[in-house]
Amino acid sequence: MNEWILPLAVGAATGVLSGFGVGGGTLLLVYMTAFAGVEQRLAQGINLLYFLPAGLLALPAHMKNGYIEKRALLPAVAAGLVCAALSAWAATAMDVALLKKLFGGFLIAVGLMELFGRKKG
């Protein structure tokens, strides 16, 4: 009975972070692979399905507040779609152990950039 409480809490917390634009999906991936024992490729698929409604529900608030750069929107969406398709194809062909190492390296790089990056204004 209690086995659904932690996933529910993690989903709620990452949903809040996604609404703020912090990257809740990345944290959801970390939870699923490191703590819930979900295989990396399956976790990535779940994360994609999670992101769609979370992003769609956060989008109207960001648009209302003027946080969407409309000139950059179409090129960013086009590049994102192409890169997402190519990356998904590459990830399904890649060894899971290598995929985990690359994802871990990505998280370390982003964390270091956040800790030691230049502060704006």
Image: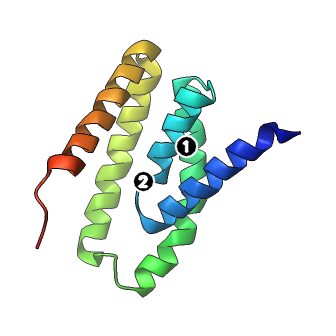
- Residue position marked by numbered label 2 in the rendering: 23
Chain-order first, disc 2 or disc 1 = 2
The location of residue 106, given as percent across then percent down, is 30, 34
Q: Is residue 58 above or below residue 43?
A: below
What SS does tag 2 mark?
Answer: loop
What SS does tag 1 mark?
Answer: helix
Q: Is residue 46 left or right of residue 92?
A: right
Q: Nearer the viewer, residue 115 or 71?
A: 115
Q: Is residue 53 above or below residue 38?
A: below
Q: Nearer the viewer, mark 2 or mark 1?
A: 2
The location of residue 98, given as percent across then percent down, is 37, 16
Q: Nearer the viewer, residue 19 or 95?
A: 19
The location of residue 105, given as percent across then percent down, is 29, 28
Picture residue at 57% right of the left edge, 59% below the top: 15
Q: Nearer the viewer, residue 92 or 41?
A: 41
Q: How is the image coloured?
A: rainbow
- Residue position marked by numbered label 1 in the rendering: 47
Q: Is residue 77 above or below residue 86?
A: below
The location of residue 80, given as percent across then percent down, is 34, 51
Q: Amino acid at mark 1?
A: Asn
The answer to which image quadrant residue 87 occupies is top left
Picture residue at 52% right of the left edge, 25% below the top: 40
Q: How packed is label 1: few (under 14 Cα within 10 Å), some, or many (20 or more)? A: some
Picture residue at 42% right of the left edge, 25% below the top: 91
Q: Is residue 96 left or right of residue 101?
A: right
In this view of the protein, can residue 57 be seen by the observer?
A: yes
Quadrant where the image shows the C terminus: bottom left
Quadrant where the image shows the N terminus: top right
Q: Is residue 73 left or right of residue 27?
A: left
Q: Is residue 40 left or right of residue 116?
A: right
Does the CB distance between marks 2 and 1 fall below 8 Å?
no
